[in-house]
Image: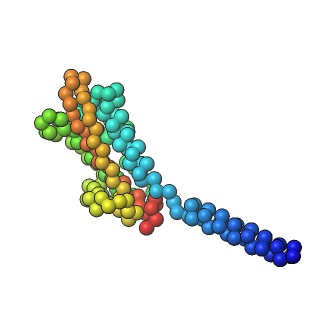
Amino acid sequence: MEKVMSVYWFAIIFIVAGAIVYMVSNFYGEPYDIREVESNALVYQISNCLIPELYLKMDAFNAPDFFSYCKLTFETEKYAKWENDSQFFVSVVVSDFSTGSVIFSNQTGSPSLNDFCDLQKNGHQKNLPYCLSRKVYAVDSEGTQYFVNMDVAINKGEKNAKL
């Protein structure tokens, strides 16, 4: 009887070990897709640059290079053929709250990435750039109200989301 139980015992151990190996390989088998985290960090950095102490910083609009003023660089690591192709698109538009007129507008990166953002309304897809759009209400030191619209598109699909 003990010999029969030991066969079942080894079978159970083999099944449990196989399940653990399967779960670990599933979890670590694909790279982490951090494009969502990266785009949220980018939006946070832009909004923190424009609205550092609850008031809109108007001198940021007069800077020769807005993104350098905010200490943002869009250099990517050398991966695949990324040297010649921008993997980011960032657009910042500040408009007057009451009139809707644009006070400031600046963008950098590859505008073609933003074209794919409309296709992504049905959910996150690995083969498309990750898109994020945020609107922030801001007030300057005189009390004038503004909307700050930030659009971010990050591709990096070849590395972060294996296609």
* Residue nearest the viewer, comparing 84 with 56: 56
Task: Name above or below for residue 161 compared with residue 134.
Answer: below
Taking the spot 27% from the left edge, 42% from the top edge, the residue there is 135
- Residue farthest along the right direction in this orientation: 2
Task: Name above or below for residue 102 compared with residue 132.
Answer: above
* Residue nearest the viewer, comparing 136 with 104: 136
- Residue 162 percent across, percent down from the top left: 46, 65
Q: On the picture, is 99 further left or further right than 163?
A: left
Does residue 49 show up? yes
Task: Name above or below for residue 35 compared with residue 136.
Answer: below
Q: In which quarter of the image is residue 24?
A: bottom right
Taking the spot 83% from the left edge, 72% from the top edge, the residue there is 6
The quarter of the image holding the C terminus is bottom left
- Residue farthest along the front direction in this orientation: 1
The quarter of the image holding the N terminus is bottom right
Q: On the picture, is 33 further left or further right than 53?
A: right
- Residue 4 percent across, percent down from the top left: 83, 77
Task: Name above or below for residue 35 compared with residue 4.
Answer: above
- Residue 77 percent across, percent down from the top left: 45, 54
Q: On the picture, is 55 further left or further right than 23?
A: left
- Residue 126 percent across, percent down from the top left: 40, 63
Taking the spot 32% from the left edge, 27% from the top edge, the residue there is 54
Taking the spot 26% from the left edge, 35% from the top edge, the residue there is 137
Q: Please give the count of numbered marks on the rendered protein.
A: 0
Q: Quadrant of residue 154?
A: bottom left
Q: How is the image coloured?
A: rainbow
Does residue 116 show up? no
Q: On the picture, is 111 further left or further right than 102?
A: right
* Residue nearest the viewer, comparing 18 with 42: 18
